[in-house]
Amino acid sequence: MVSIQAVFNLLRSINDQLVKCDLLLQSHTDKLNGIEKKLNILPFQQDIPVLSIELPLKTVEELEHFEETLKDETQLAALKHILKRLVESTERSSVFKMLSKMFDFELATICSWKGRKQNYRTENLALIKILIETVHDSFPYAKDGVIEHAGIDWFRAAQQRFARRKNTLQ
């Protein structure tokens, strides 16, 4: 059993390392700003859209509200930006990671791809269509069946993931 003092020392060490990283980052930022001024270069500005709803979605009501917000182009762009950053080495692992980002495990237990067993049907949702589009952008030869099966499998295993997380939190 790990002592409280050992945990405290570990957390203190992590905090000290974070402070050092922050100082180093600030130093590098200051140096870059100085170089930009000397070279008369404008600082790099990137417009990254921000979602108005926090992910993962926890309730069906949040999911339906999120679907409504996706009618706004900035929200659509924000979701696409987030999903593109979650692409993995395979279509299947990408779908798993994207669904994990969008759906809380508890919400996933009452959803399914096709809506079987009176679960909430997700295959026709705008966010799923964006997920499929993002996977196709990253894997141009990906077949819809592979993406669909990955989604079906992810929702099928939701109950196990939720139970496992619930057990680890107790």
Image (spheres, grey):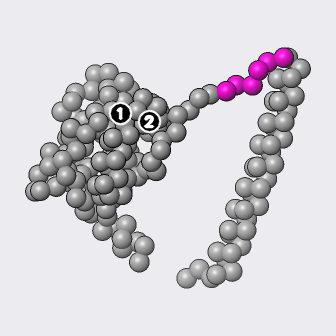
- How far across and how far down the image is residue 151, in percent? 24, 43
Residue at 25%, 59% (x, y): give it.
109
Residue farthest to the top?
40
Mark 2 = which residue? 75
Question: In the figure, 100 relative to 15: above or below?
Answer: above
Region rendered in magenta: 40-45
The answer to whether residue 135 is seen in the rendering is no
The picture quadrant where one finds residue 67 is top left
**Residue found at x 14% / y 49%:** 115
**Residue displayed at 22% across by 34% down:** 146
The quarter in which the N terminus is drawn is bottom right
**Residue position marked by numbered label 1 in the rendering:** 71
Q: Element at badge 1?
A: loop
Which quadrant of the view contains residue 47? Answer: top right
Q: Is residue 158 above or below residue 102?
A: below
The numbered disc on residue 124 is none
Secondary structure beneath label 2: helix
Tell whether position 144 is magenta. Answer: no
The kind of residue on which mark 2 rests is: Gln
